């Protein structure tokens, strides 16, 4: 490690690494073929305590820190980015809103079983016309007596077809745009919920992403987690983005490690012109470049995670460092996979090679935690280049 870990952090890292190798790795082929994480594996992840890593012991969690979140994300991503993506969504966006704003009754209904792995949550924000540009969201929520009525279409919803409930972002005042976003939790069996098409993907084949429609969907007003039109939803979203970006950077670290390990193993075994290609500069220098940049990315990622733990998840300096971290680590993951493909040559083009899966999966890191362009805009603003 590039930072000194506590005993708890070391035990967390070791236990998740062993779990990923024992339980997740053997299931990869089945997940890739079927296109989703089986319920049995999902429950095992819950029993491992991974979904409750951020939450109070009162609700079945372990109340660990951001460094631990990153360790978990990195170790699972090294084995399967599909599982890591869906797992981090469950222990973050799909549960955090309920933990922060939900009543005790709502926490018992949704948060506790989600932590146990008994149910799946889904986070619905992205729309066909609004993703990075939140000002063009069109989903709306309005109050009608003691009910909230939600209308809108969401897309790229992780776990959409398999979710038991949805955390939905909707506008309460379209004239105010993104600043009127509020959040509501909706059960999947609500008659106003319609699952749209499953989105075919070139990567993350072990997860499902789909459209979800909300058609005059009615829920109790209390299901609006930050209130309706009270101005709480948008600041809260901004408040978790830095943490999301650092955890996404950790996903990039895991994928980079996988590509590096595969590259080294292949280069040591592949013989060309009388000796292992690992002994040739053209190959070995590609590997050393990945290893060097991986160490730099890990230093940055875990330093920013440590700052969040020392000064709070919304520490001021992290508004600049978090997008830097996400961009650097995720760009490295793509570069590492590309170099791994060049090292393996034609062998990497085989469907039997894990490098092909890494290559397709790495594209998801472009938009997870904010696109590179959006993050660069934030960095420029924080540097004082413009208002």
Image (spheres, rainbow, N blue to C red):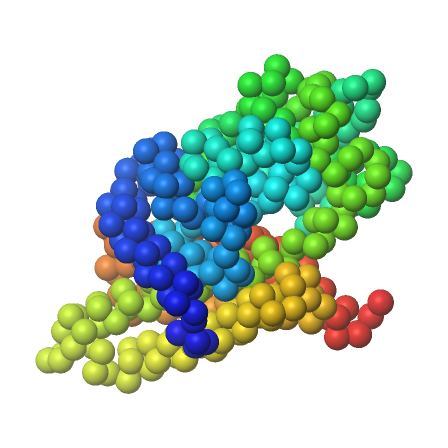
Task: Point out residue 320 in the picture as x, y percentages from the top left corner.
Answer: 68, 69
> Is the residue 206 above or below the residue 185 in the image?
below
Give the residue drawn at x 53%, y 42%.
Answer: 58
> Is the residue 258 above or below the residue 169 in the image?
below
Q: Residue furthest top?
A: 191
Q: Residue furthest right?
A: 175
> Is the residue 361 above or below the residue 291 in the image?
above
Q: Quadrant of the C terminus?
A: bottom right
Q: Residue furthest left?
A: 274
Task: Point out residue 385 in the picture as x, y percentages from the top left corner.
Answer: 79, 74
**Front residue (pair 113, 181):** 113
Counting labels gives: 0
**Front residue (pair 127, 318):** 318
Q: Can the viewer see residue 281?
A: yes
Q: Quadrant of the N terminus?
A: bottom left
Give the residue drawn at x 43%, y 37%.
Answer: 116
Give the residue drawn at x 15%, y 70%.
Answer: 269
Residue 311: quarter of image: bottom right
Give the residue drawn at x 59%, y 38%.
Answer: 123
* Left or right position of 308 against 275: right
Task: Point out residue 313 in the picture as x, y percentages from the top left corner.
Answer: 64, 61
Q: Residue furthest front?
A: 58
**Front residue (pair 127, 65):** 65
* Left or right position of 313 against 89: right
Q: Can the viewer see residue 149?
A: no
Task: Point out residue 147 in the picture as x, y percentages from the top left corner.
Answer: 76, 20
């Amino acid at each position: 490690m590039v930072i000194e870990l506590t005993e708890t952090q070391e035990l967390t890292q070791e236990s998740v690494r062993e779990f990923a190798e024992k339980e997740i790795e053997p299931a990869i082929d089945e997940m890739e073929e079927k296109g989703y994480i089986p319920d049995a594996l999902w429950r095992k992840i819950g029993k491992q305590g991974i979904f409750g890593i951020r939450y109070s012991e009162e609700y079945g969690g372990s109340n660990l820190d951001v460094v631990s979140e990153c360790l978990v994300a990195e170790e699972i991503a090294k084995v399967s980015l599909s599982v890591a993506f869906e797992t981090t969504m469950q222990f973050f966006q799909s549960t955090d809103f309920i933990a922060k704003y939900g009543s005790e009754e709502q926490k018992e209904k949704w948060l506790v079983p989600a932590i146990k792995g008994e149910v799946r949550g889904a986070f619905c924000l992205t729309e066909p016309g609004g993703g990075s540009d939140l000002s063009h969201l069109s989903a709306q929520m309005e109050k009608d007596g003691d009910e909230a009525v939600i209308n809108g279409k969401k897309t790229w919803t992780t776990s959409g077809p398999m979710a038991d409930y949805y955390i939905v972002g909707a506008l309460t005042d379209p004239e105010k745009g993104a600043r009127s976003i509020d959040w509501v939790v909706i059960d999947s069996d609500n008659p106003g919920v319609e699952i749209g098409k499953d989105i075919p993907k070139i990567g993350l084949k072990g997860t499902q992403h789909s459209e979800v429609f909300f058609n005059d969907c009615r829920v109790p007003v209390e299901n609006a987690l930050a209130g309706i039109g009270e101005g709480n939803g948008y600041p809260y979203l901004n408040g978790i983005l830095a943490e999301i970006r650092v955890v996404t950077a950790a996903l990039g670290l895991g994928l980079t490690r996988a590509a590096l390990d595969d590259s080294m193993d292949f280069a040591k075994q592949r013989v060309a012109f009388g000796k292992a290609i690992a002994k040739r500069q053209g190959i070995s220098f590609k590997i050393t470049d990945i290893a060097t940049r991986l160490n730099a990315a890990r230093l940055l990622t875990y330093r920013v995670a440590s700052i969040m733990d020392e000064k709070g998840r919304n520490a001021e300096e992290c508004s600049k460092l978090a997008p830097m971290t996400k961009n650097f680590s995720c760009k490295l993951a793509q570069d590492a996979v590309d170099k791994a493909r060049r090292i393996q040559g034609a062998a990497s083009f085989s469907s039997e090679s894990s490098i092909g899966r890494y290559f397709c999966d790495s594209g998801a890191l472009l938009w997870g935690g904010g696109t590179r362009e959006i993050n660069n805009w934030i960095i420029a603003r924080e540097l004082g280049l413009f208002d």
